[in-house]
Image: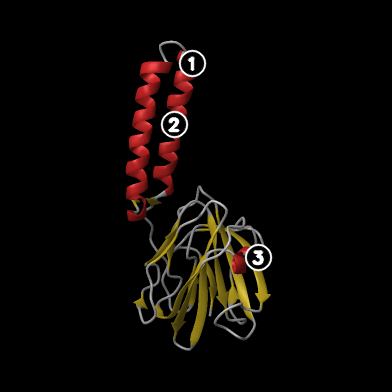
C-alpha cells in the first residue's frame, strides 16, 4: 500500500500537530489527570491513523476491457436512473452514482480507455453528497470520455466535507482505463452519465472498488 501524493502536505501538517498535542498532553495533562491524558493521546493518534488511511492507495489488479466500464472510485451505488443531463449531452442518458464515505479509498480512476473530449470545473454548493441536487448544484469537475463511437461523462462531486476536487485531465488527452484521473478529499460522490443502452451489472446499495468492479458494458 502507498500514500497518494495529494496527501503529503496534509499528513506532514497533521503529524506535526499530533506530535505537539501528544507532547503537551504528556507534560501538562498526564501528571495530574492520567486517564484524561491517555484519552487525548489515543484519540489524537487515532485521528492521524485515519488521515493516513484516507490517502492510501491499495495494491490491486485492475480490470481491463474495451467493452467494460469499471468503477472510477470505491463506494456504494446509490443511483441508477434515466436522466436529462445538465451539461454537454442533449439527449436522455443513464445516470449511475457512487457515494464515497470518508472511509473509502478516494483515488478516482478512468472508467474506460479513450480520448478526453471535455474537462470543466464548476464552482458550487456543498450539499451532502447523497442530496439529489448535489449532482447539479455542488462544486464538481466534469470529464467526457470517448471510446470509439461511445461517449460518457464522469462528474467528481464535492460533498459537505469534501471541499477540494483534484482532476488531472484536459481535453485532447489520451487516457488508459484504470489510470488516475483525480482525487476528492473527505467524502463525496462520482456520477457517470452513460448511454441509455448501457448494460448495467451492479445494483443499488452494492459496494464497488475503483478500477476493479465492472459497472456495465457498452
Crowding at mark 1 (Cα within 10 Å: few <14, some 14-19, many 20+): few
Callout 1 secondary element: helix
Identify the image quadrant of residue 79: bottom right
> Compared with residue 18, is residue 37 higher up or lower down, i.e. above or below?
above
The alpha-carbon separation of the residues under discs 1 and 3 comes to: 46 Å
Q: Residue at the spot x=45%, y=19% of the render?
A: 37
Q: Earlier in the sequence, mark 2 or mark 3?
A: 2
Query: Mark 2 sits on what residue?
Result: 44
Percent from the top left, x then y, of residue 91? 62, 86
Q: Report if the CB atoms under discs 2 and 1 are less than 8 Å apart.
A: no
Whether residue 202 appears in this view of the structure is: no
Query: Mark 1 sits on what residue?
Result: 35
The alpha-carbon separation of the residues under discs 2 and 3 comes to: 35 Å
Query: Mark 3 sits on what residue?
Result: 133
Query: How many numbered marks does the figure carry?
Result: 3
Q: Is residue 134 left or right of residue 39?
A: right
The alpha-carbon separation of the residues under discs 2 and 1 comes to: 14 Å
Callout 3 secondary element: loop
Q: Report if the CB atoms under discs 2 and 3 are less than 8 Å apart.
A: no
Whether residue 64 appears in this view of the structure is: yes
Q: How is the image coloured?
A: secondary structure
Callout 2 secondary element: helix
Amino acid at each position: 500500500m502507498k500514500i497518494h501524493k495529494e496527501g503529503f502536505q496534509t499528513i506532514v501538517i497533521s503529524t506535526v500537530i499530533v506530535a505537539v498535542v501528544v507532547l503537551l498532553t504528556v507534560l501538562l495533562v498526564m501528571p495530574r489527570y492520567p486517564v484524561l491524558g491517555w484519552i487525548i493521546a489515543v484519540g489524537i493518534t487515532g485521528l492521524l491513523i485515519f488521515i493516513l488511511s484516507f490517502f492510501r492507495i491499495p495494491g490491486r489488479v485492475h480490470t481491463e476491457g474495451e467493452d467494460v466500464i469499471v468503477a472510477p472510485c470505491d463506494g456504494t451505488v446509490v443511483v441508477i436512473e434515466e436522466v436529462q443531463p445538465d451539461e454537454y449531452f442533449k439527449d436522455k442518458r443513464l445516470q449511475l452514482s457512487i457515494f464515497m464515505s470518508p472511509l473509502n479509498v478516494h483515488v478516482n480512476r478512468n472508467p474506460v480507455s479513450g480520448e478526453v473530449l471535455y474537462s470543466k470545473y464548476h464552482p458550487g454548493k456543498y450539499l451532502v453528497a447523497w442530496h439529489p441536487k448535489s449532482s447539479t448544484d455542488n462544486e464538481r469537475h466534469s470529464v467526457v470520455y470517448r471510446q470509439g463511437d461511445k461517449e460518457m461523462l464522469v462528474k467528481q462531486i464535492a460533498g459537505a466535507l469534501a471541499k477540494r476536487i483534484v482532476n488531472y485531465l484536459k481535453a485532447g488527452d489520451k487516457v488508459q482505463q484504470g489510470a488516475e484521473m483525480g482525487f476528492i478529499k473527505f467524502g463525496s460522490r462520482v456520477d457517470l452519465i452513460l448511454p441509455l443502452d448501457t448494460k448495467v451489472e451492479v445494483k443499488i446499495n452494492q459496494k464497488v472498488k475503483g478500477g476493479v468492479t465492472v459497472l456495465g458494458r457498452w
